Amino acid sequence: MAGTMNAGALAGLKVLDLSRVLAGPWAGQLLADLGADVVKVERPGNGDDTRAWGPPWLPDAAGNPTSEAAYYLSANRNKRSVAIDIATAEGQALVRQLAARADVVLENFKVGGLAQYGLDYASLKVVNPRLIYCSITGFGQDGPYAQRAGYDFLIQGMGGLMSLTGRPDGEAGAGPMKVGVALTDVMTGLYASNAVLAALAHRERSGQGQHIDLALLDVQVAVLANQAANYLVGGTAPQRMGNAHPNIVPYQDFATADGYMIVAVGNDGQFRKLCEVLGRAEWGTDERYATNPQRVRHRAELVAGIHAVTVTRTTAEWVALMETAGVPCGPINTLDKVFDDPQVQARGMRIEMPHPVAGTVPLVANPIRLSATPVTYDRPPPMLGEHTAEVLADWLQNR
């Protein structure tokens, strides 16, 4: 079973993935889903750190836990695994040979960490001038923090995201809070795959490869988006607002008779529809609330008024009424309800793949829908070193 198996958009592209944990592997999985032949280089015996990040462990057909951690499974689909010890001269030589035939290298070692093995960009571009070499670090290749290790949680704090996340001071449970997913890592993986595709487009025109320097901290600052702009333009650092929005009202959670729901009003027309559903049509023309700037100014009293009404019906009742009226509204789902949601099911966001140890493995689908070159699911997340002989024969012998 040599080479890439599908005819995806990136079929024929060879990616050597030297990364581990999440940001780099996430980029590699995306490229693999799109058809690239992604070879994951792992340490013999241990492999990617996340192979040990359980429980939960993937159960086999009898329900017994295997050695496959759910965390690892989330970011390594459609790849082939080779076990190579890059601390040895033989291992370094093998990786150099693979890199000489690769289009892309992904790595997330500390700054300068691969130079001692002759596997840094300066070394590999000598043997492959067309190589796209993507380095992912916590803080980038230069600057006063370049030598520091960077982790998602740390970067969420340093990069400002936690200052915006959580209940505001004075409320129960107040304090900065990380996002419940390693969002900085995931976003860095997405930026990395975009950067790789941009570099490949440049190579098509110039014939030359290049080095990509991608830092978790840079990405976290970049994805502050409107909150960063609010600070840069307004001069005041935004504060934690819980589930409220700094620029739009009402755009938050509201208590209902049996839980909570989200109301996400994006314009004045939707607000007037909301007022009608709530039985408070007069709010739609009240000068305090008729426009969004006025609603932001009178946020506290408007939110209190809406809350007094929403607690009179259940979440399901409100969602049905607001959907009919065209008001964006929805429940706050736990993950069991997410995967039971009819829209999520209709879009096929849960997939099952055959697995050599467990029989099958459940995974989250790739959300990209391409009409001509759709994503295919050809390989489950590989066992450690599963494809070593196959890849070495495929990449190094079948030239």
Image: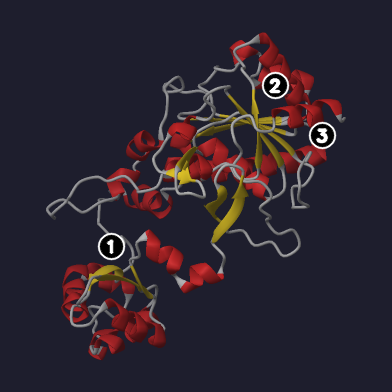
Q: Amino acid at mark 1?
A: Ala
Q: Quick one: label 3, few (<14), some, or many (20+) residues within 10 Å? A: few
- Give the side of residue 246 with respect to residue 91, left or right: left
**Could you tell me which secondary element the residue under label 1 belongs to?**
loop
Q: Earlier in the sequence, mark 1 or mark 2?
A: 2
Task: Determine if residue 378 is in view.
Answer: yes
Residue 215 position, x and y percent, is: 50, 33
Q: Is residue 366 visible?
A: no
Q: Position of residue 201 (x, y in %)?
A: 75, 43
Q: Position of residue 16 (x, y in %)?
A: 68, 31
The circle on residue 184 is none
Q: Position of residue 282 (x, y in %)?
A: 23, 89
Q: Quadrant of residue 367?
A: bottom right
Distance of label 1 from label 3 (alpha carbons): 49 Å
Whether pointer 2 and pointer 3 mark residues with C-beta atoms closer than 8 Å, the reply is no
276 lies above or below 62: below
Q: Residues within 10 Å of mark 1 (few under 14, many from 20)?
A: some
At 39% from the left and 62% from the top, the residue drawn is 336
Q: What type is the residue that disc 3 sits on? A: Gly
| Marking on residue 244 | 1
Nearest the viewer among 295 and 270 is 270
Residue drawn at the location 40% of the way across and 82% of the way down: 323
Quarter of the picture holding the N terminus: top right
Disc 1 to disc 2, C-alpha distance: 50 Å
Q: Which mark is residue 207?
A: 3
